[in-house]
Image: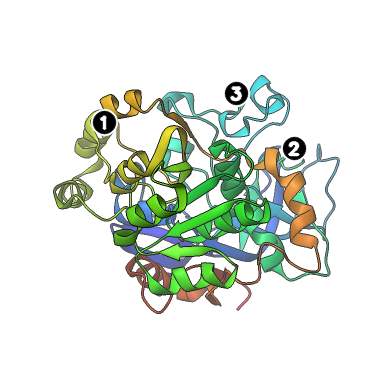
Amino acid sequence: MRALTWKGRRRVSVEEVPDPRIEEPTDAIVRITSTAICGSDLHLYELMGPYLDRGDILGHEAMGVVEEVGSAITSLRVGQRVVVPFNIACGHCWMCRHGLQSQCETTQVTEQGTGAALFGYTKLYGQVPGGQAELLRVPLADYNTIPVGVELPDERYLFLSDVLPTALQGVQYAHVPDGGTLVVLGLGAVGQFASRIARHQGLEVLAVDPVHERREMARRHGVAVCAPEQVAERVRELTGGRGADAVVDAVGLEAHGNPMVHAAHLALGSLPGAISRPVMDHMGLDRTAALLSAIDLVRRGGTVSISGVYAGEADPLPMKTMFDKQLTLRMGQCNVKRWVPQLVELVEDPADPLGTTDLTTHRVPLSEAPDMYRIFQRKEDGCIKVVLDPSL
């Protein structure tokens, strides 16, 4: 089969690789019909090379049709259309039963000290082959698939794999009071959906991004927007100077700012993994401009909800300010299966209230993935969300 493989920093390639096969009775093989490039894939493209091997298959947002099932599968059938959540969970351990599927005790990557295994996401999360490919092996497939209908286009369902539940979790973790004000930092896919979900819930939303095309997309869905240099004044105006009730950081470690940390990222990415991994494990730093902005913008007693991925172990935070402002922080990998039931009804609504069909800016053949990684990272050509089609 063809698959998108990692070759080195800012180098990925579509190559012929062996087809996946059933390895456990609980596996299924899914033929991928749509698979997206996520903003967190750019962390692998740019920074996380020390945790990758040449030839690793990337991608964790995928859907398709079941092609083969293991002997212990009970709820899936060949030919069924499914979405594949990005985290791999068992569904029956204590964590899963308490809605913390991203911490699944069955698939935790204990040798790395991390949570549940993820598709296509480095040694830190199990080094499981990802979904930017023609075929995907799905472990524990009865639980790690979301059966969907056949009438609607892929884009109505695809984002159930990651960005829609991640956005909903971000809004839920923000715990905005009725009639409250939410600021969303970053208008990539998660920020777009977080803004739309918050609006759908009746909240007052202000979304912030430096890129004009991203602000215009949010504006189409009734979201008030501004550039970063305007946000402090806008929040003061909206809240009488008090600050936002909550802020969702949908940016993470790819934030602009702190050129010294960016230079350190580039230097680490060029070193052999055996040298750079210990440094990143214990002394890694993120560019925290978005997080620091969130702490500044939120009101006293408010909540900062972190959906953007951070990976540093030595990030300095303004603890005096956070303590003095009595802030609550909520964060973490999304627990996809926790949120899917309430999202399916919305994505299947004929009115498409979350605008799932107005997110993809580029739908291209899988063969164009290397070019699209470059374009997406540089925010060129109005690129907000890329969907790859392995059938083309």
| Alpha carbon distance from label 2 to label 1 | 50 Å
**Mark toward the viewer: 3 or 2:** 3
Disc 3 secondary structure class: loop
Q: Residue at x 27, y 42 (%)?
A: 286
Disc 2 secondary structure class: loop
Indicate the amino acid at tag 2: Pro
Q: Residue 348's quadrant in the figure?
A: bottom right
**Circle nearer the N terminus (2, 1):** 2
- Of residues 316 and 284, the one drawn nearer to the viewer in this rendering: 316
Give percent across and percent down for residue 160: 66, 53
Q: Residue at x 49, y 37 (%)?
A: 126
Give percent across and percent down for residue 207: 46, 58
Q: Residue at x 57, y 47 (%)?
A: 166
Instruction: List the residue tagged with mark 1.
Output: 318
Lateral position of residue 204 relative to residue 265, left or right? right
Instruction: List the residue tagged with mark 3.
Output: 105
Q: Residues within 10 Å of mark 3 (few under 14, many from 20)?
A: many
Quarter in which the C terminus is drawn: bottom right
Give percent across and percent down for residue 264: 16, 46
Indicate the amino acid at tag 3: Glu
Instruction: List the residue tagged with mark 2.
Output: 25
Lateral position of residue 168 relative to residue 205, left or right? right
Give percent across and percent down for residue 317: 27, 32
| Alpha carbon distance from label 3 to label 1 | 33 Å
Disc 1 secondary structure class: loop
**Mark toward the viewer: 3 or 1:** 1
- Of residues 198 and 47, the one drawn nearer to the viewer in this rendering: 198
